[in-house]
Amino acid sequence: MDPVTTGTLLGGKVIYRQFPTGNRTGLEPVLMAAFVPARPGQVVAEGGCGAGAGLLCLANRVPGLTGIGLEHDSATASLAAHNFQLNGRDGLRVRQTTLPALPDDPLLSGPGLRRIDHAFANPPWHGHDSSASPHTQRDLARRPPTGQLPGWVRVMAAQLRHHGTLTLALPASLLGAGVSAMETARLGGIRIFPFWPRPGHAARIVLVQGRANSRAGSQMLPGLVLHEAGGGFTPAARAVLEGGAPLAG
């Protein structure tokens, strides 16, 4: 395996290794995992799982999960598998694939059978008019092929059991596209959870969550301020990012 750096997530509850160059894990997978309404014993899937931060954080909060991560880059997929083993998460595994294509795996749906209770993804954000990264792994994680978001939503929504959820971490600029993709995939009860970087600043990151077979209307939730005026995390943000608390919704 290529050289890695070793750190932790959730205030030391999760040991986490990642490549020193390329796409580095930010806050989004941790925040996203805190919003997934999984219960003990359920089955979850993460699209574009990277080195496994989202699944590891969710498994830390919710015991007894079975989960599969889907990752395009083979080296990053191998690192995710290593992180799962390092943390003793035998119920988690990773498969290399390029969404919206799905691998052949027992956890994924066959004809007439859906096994996934909750799916989630932090899709690539940057358009192709943005500057390319010199690091291939980082560029693949940041700049999606044209029209990829609807394809990701469609294929992951198709895996969900009755009333299962799909959660996306998106920049605020893609909120409309995310909601539209979910509605096209027949997800309802859409909930939007914004994050404000500081008091009085516009939200930059949003979580968008839809539910299969739901006809409920959309909700804009109160959201969370991440940083205090002085720059440190707010107590509510620390409870999630370091304490592993769920996001209230």
Image (tube, helix red, strand yellow):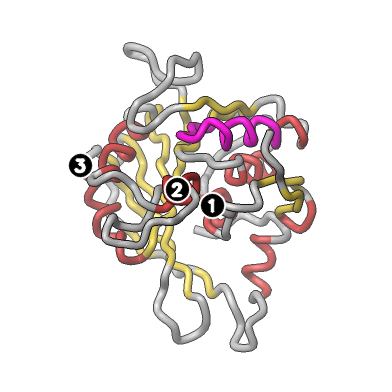
Residue pictured at 69% horizontal, 54% vertical: 244
Q: Which quadrant is the N terminus positioned in?
A: top right
Element type at mark 3:
helix
The image's mark for residue 140 is none
Q: Secondary structure at mark 2?
A: helix
Per the image, the residue denoted by label 3 is 184
- Give the residue at mark 1: 23
Identity of the residue furthest to the front in this view: 134
- Residue type, numbered disc 2: Ala
Mark 3 / mark 1, whichever is N-terminal: 1
Camera-nearest residue between 245 and 125: 125
Q: Which residues are magenta?
A: 69-83
Q: Position of residue 177 (x, y in %)?
A: 25, 54
* Residue contact between numbered discs 1 and 2, judged by CB atoms under 8 Å: yes
Alpha carbon distance from label 1 to label 2 = 7 Å
Query: Does 118 appear above or below 94?
Result: below
Circle nearer the N terminus (1, 2): 1
Asked whether 74 falls inside the magenta stretch, the response is yes
Q: Which residue is mark 2?
A: 141
Q: Residues within 10 Å of mark 1 (few under 14, many from 20)?
A: many
Amino acid of disc 1: Asn
Assess whether residue 50 is covered by the magenta stretch: no
Which numbered disc, 2 or 3, marks the residue that appears first in the sequence?
2
Q: Nearer the viewer, residue 99 or 132?
A: 132
Q: Are marks 3 and 1 in contact (CB under 8 Å)?
A: no
Q: Which dot, 2 or 3, sits closer to the camera?
A: 2
Left or right position of 129 against 55: left
Looking at the image, which residue is at 66% across and 61% down? Answer: 241
Residue 135 position in % (x across, y down): 50, 50
Q: Main secondary structure of the magenta part?
A: helix
Give, as a three-letter code, the residue at label 3: Thr
Asked if one can make out residue 45 in the rendered structure from this viewpoint, the answer is no
